[in-house]
Image: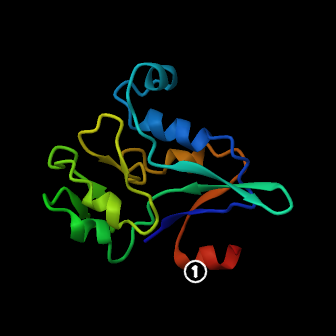
């Protein structure tokens, strides 16, 4: 299965991945309305790292769609599941907001959503064919790769 890999050496910290993630998961699918009128939590977050001597780096943090996901095992309602393609998904209708998945994710990639009714995590933009964070990254810092392809690029 292909996964999203972030390459911090290429990340500009612009946040466009967050913008397009929010828009993709909004009701309106309108970039302005999604940010001004809807309470959407981005499933990808840009983190800033300060490295000596005063060099700032950025990287994108998102779900790794683990082979044996701890979030799925911890989910008490069965809302968190792995689909037939290996994508770790969350059924927001079944989610009870217990946040067990947030506590056990070793990457910090599962977050409490803005509406506080469910959690937010990357679903690889299954409704779009390709993750919009990748499609709209201006510096090619996020890629959808299998493990061998990712190792070759490191």
Residue closer to the observer: 89 or 109 = 109
User: Left or right: where does residue 109 sit relative to residue 134?
Assistant: left
Mark 1 neighbour density, 10 Å: few (under 14) some (14–19) many (20 or more)? few
Residue closer to the observer: 112 or 13 = 112
Report helix, strand or loop for mark 1: helix
User: Left or right: where does residue 93 sit relative to residue 52?
Assistant: left
Q: Quadrant of the N terminus?
A: bottom left
User: Left or right: where does residue 153 sit relative to residue 31?
Assistant: right
Name the residue located 42 percent from the left edge and 28 percent from the top edge.
29
Q: Quadrant of residue 87?
A: bottom left
Residue closer to the observer: 125 or 64 = 64
Q: Is residue 87 visible?
A: no
Name the residue located 29 percent from the left edge and 65 percent from the top edge.
71
Q: Work out which residue is located at the far right of the displayed protein and give it.
A: 53
Across and down, in percent, residue 143 comes to 60, 60
Across and down, in percent, residue 69 comes to 32, 71
Residue closer to the observer: 76 or 64 = 76
Name the residue located 52 percent from the left edge and 73 percent from the top edge.
146
- Give the answer, above or below, for where 81 lies relative to 48: below
Residue underneath mark 1: 148
- Give the answer, above or below, for where 146 lies relative to 118: below
Across and down, in percent, residue 82 comes to 27, 66
Across and down, in percent, residue 131 comes to 49, 50
User: Left or right: where does residue 148 sit relative to residue 153?
Assistant: left
Q: Is residue 86 visible?
A: yes
């Amino acid at each position: 299965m292909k996964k999203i890999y972030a390459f911090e050496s290429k990340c500009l910290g612009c946040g466009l991945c967050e913008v397009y993630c929010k828009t993709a998961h909004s009701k309106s699918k309108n970039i302005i309305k999604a940010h001004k009128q809807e309470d959407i939590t981005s499933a990808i977050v840009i983190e800033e790292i300060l490295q000596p001597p005063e060099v700032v780096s950025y990287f994108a943090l998102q779900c790794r769609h683990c082979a044996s996901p701890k979030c799925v095992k911890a989910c008490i309602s069965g809302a968190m599941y792995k689909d037939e393609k290996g994508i770790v998904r969350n059924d927001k209708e079944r989610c009870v907001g217990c946040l067990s998945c947030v506590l056990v994710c070793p990457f910090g990639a599962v977050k409490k959503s803005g509406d506080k009714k469910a959690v937010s995590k990357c679903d690889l933009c299954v409704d779009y064919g390709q993750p919009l964070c990748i499609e709209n990254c201006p510096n090619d810092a996020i890629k959808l790769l299998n493990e061998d392809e990712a190792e070759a690029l490191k």
